[in-house]
Image: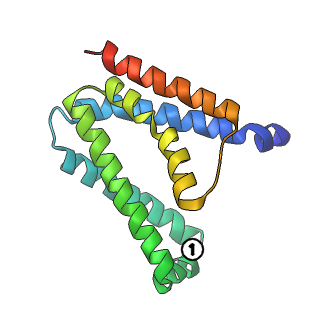
Amino acid sequence: MAAFWQTYGWVVLGLTAGAGWGMSYILYEKLLLKFPVSLVMFLTGMASFAFFGIVAWSRGYLPEIKTVFSTPMLIGGFIAVIALNILANASILTAVNMSNASRAAFLEISYPLFTLLFAYIIFKEIQLSALGMVGGCFILLGTIIMVYAGK
């Protein structure tokens, strides 16, 4: 089992994340019928803060937290990630609210293409093989089909 996890753990976790996001989007869709995006984001953000605050405290991450707040480059990196997460979450929840969970999710599935693009532009890294890029083209094609099929 350990060998399986070493080799395929990332696949299992990736699929688990996909399933979790998929289920959360359909639940968000129902919540957004009654509450504004900002309130839903606030409440889920507070719950995440409390949960991960307890995890960080219980694992003794105080020295790492001090390092982040004492290193300007790390502070800037965290501010950028936080801002991008807020933008992305607000955008997807607003898209779900304006359309539906499935259509919004099919647009969001284009994010691996942006991951490749930004990895190359910012870090000059090519993070996928040619065959993987062909798969990315299929994702893009599928996204386009889903957007037009939903009209």
Residue holding disc 1: 61
The residue nearer to you, when weighing 8 against 145, is 145
Q: Residues within 10 Å of mark 1 (few under 14, many from 20)?
A: few
The residue nearer to you, when weighing 66 against 136, is 136
Quarter of the figure that contains the C terminus: top left
**In the picture shown, does residue 69 fall above or below 81?**
below
What percent of the width, then of the height, locates residue 41? 27, 50
Name which quarter of the figure residue 76 lies in. bottom left
> Would residue 93 be found to the left or right of residue 14 on screen?
left
**In the picture shown, does residue 139 fall above or below 50?**
above
> Would residue 15 be found to the left or right of residue 95 on screen?
right
* Color encoding of the figure: rainbow
Quarter of the figure that contains the N terminus: top right
The residue positioned 61% from the left and 58% from the top of the image is 124
Can you name the residue that lies furthest to the right here? 3
**In the picture shown, does residue 130 fall above or below 6?**
above
What percent of the width, then of the height, locates residue 34? 14, 35
What percent of the width, then of the height, locates residue 99? 23, 26
> Would residue 109 be found to the left or right of residue 28 on screen?
right
> Would residue 57 be found to the left or right of residue 96 on screen?
right
Name which quarter of the figure residue 50 lies in. bottom left
